[in-house]
Amino acid sequence: MPNISNLYFRTAILFLIAGIGLGLMMSISGEHNVIGAHAHINLLGWVTSALFGGYYALNPAKAAGRLPMAQYLVYTVGVFVMSLSLYFLLLGNAAMVPIVAGSSLLTFLGVLIFAWIVWSPAPSAARSPLAA
């Protein structure tokens, strides 16, 4: 399995732990005002990261090079900052609005880079020294 897949799966598990932890905190306290952050952590952090990792595992030729790693960094930083700033925004800190907006755009850029990777042709097998 490509390194980027392992990285995405490990990151996805960390987001899952954070998302479940936040869900437990809301359940125990009875305060559900940060449910939006909980949903973003679980969907964009856990589910989407795991799907990215699965795609790269199924397409190892597209997992090679700098672009997949750049996509991982852009997307993961975007989701992390967006989730954290959204949490504080939902707690009432209006100063987080520009940070949520900027990190949402960063996350979207990570998705656009991934779309580019998906729609681009895989590197040619003929260039590979292992090609028959």
Image (cartoon, grey):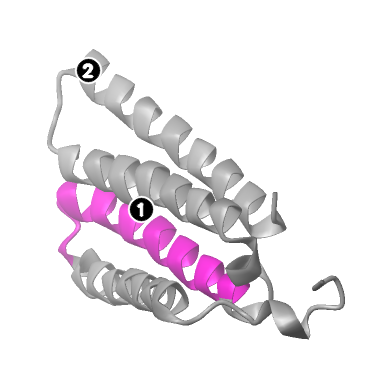
* Disc on res. 27: 2
Q: Nearer the viewer, residue 52 or 77?
A: 52
User: How far separated are the C-alphas under marks 2 and 1?
Assistant: 19 Å
Residue at 33 percent of width and 71 percent of height: 103
Residue 115 in the image, given as x and y percentages of width and height? 37, 74
Residue at 38 percent of width and 59 percent of height: 79
Q: Main secondary structure of the magenta part?
A: helix
Magenta stretch: includes residue 70: yes
Location of the C terminus (image quadrant): bottom right
Residue 131 in the image, given as x and y percentages of width and height? 80, 73
Residue under circle 1?
A: 84
Residue at 42 percent of width and 72 percent of height: 118
Q: Nearer the viewer, residue 41 or 127?
A: 127
Seen from this angle, which residue lies furthest bottom?
127
Seen from this angle, which residue lies furthest top?
28
Q: Amino acid at mark 2?
A: Ser
Secondary structure under tag 1 reads helix
Magenta stretch: includes residue 67: no
Q: Amino acid at mark 1?
A: Leu
The answer to whether 25 is drawn above or below residue 7 in the figure is: above
Secondary structure under tag 2 reads helix
Write down the region rendered in magenta.
68-94
2 or 1: tag closer to the N-terminus = 2
